[in-house]
């Protein structure tokens, strides 16, 4: 269930929000909602996906050698199941 939040902005900020929303093909509400999500996002998670993928990419062969029966299929490896 969603909750309504009402904020007041001056005319200049509203015009900027409306302009940006139109340029991005979205709504002012969607822009503000995304900004609110960004404001409460845990900064420690920034870049976590890229770091995890880099770790997996650099250690996949060692895992495959150590645990050949448990090696998952990799899309980038020839002859492996996806």
Image: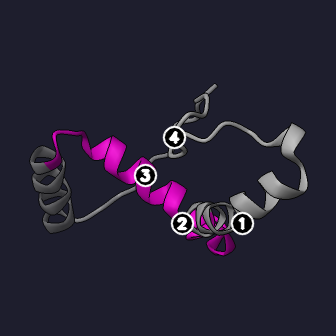
Distance Cα–Cα, label 3 vs label 2: 9 Å
Distance between mark 1 and mark 3 Cα atoms: 35 Å
Q: Which residue is mark 3?
A: 34
How many angstroms separate mark 1 from mark 4 (CA)? 17 Å
Which quadrant, please, contains the C terminus?
top right
Judging by the rendered image, the residue that carries numbered circle 4 is 78
Q: Is residue 19 magenta?
A: no
* Badge 4 element: loop
Left or right for 64, reference 23: right
Q: Which residues are magenta?
A: 24-48
Give how far apart the Cα atoms at labels 2 and 4 are: 42 Å
First in residue order: circle 1 vs circle 2? 2
Which secondary structure lies at badge 1? helix
Count residues near mark 2 (Cα–Cα under 10 Å), then give few for <14, some for 14-19, many for 20+: few
Residue sitting farthest toward the bottom: 44
Magenta stretch containing residue 36, yes or no? yes
């Amino acid at each position: 269930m969603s909750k309504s939040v009402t904020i007041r902005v001056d005319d200049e900020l509203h015009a900027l929000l409306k302009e940006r929303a139109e340029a991005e093909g979205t709504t002012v509400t969607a822009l503000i909602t995304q900004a609110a999500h960004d404001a409460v996002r845990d900064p420690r998670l920034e870049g976590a996906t890229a770091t995890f993928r880099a770790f997996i990419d650099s250690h996949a062969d060692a895992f495959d050698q150590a645990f050949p029966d448990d090696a998952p299929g990799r899309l980038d490896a020839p002859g492996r199941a996806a």
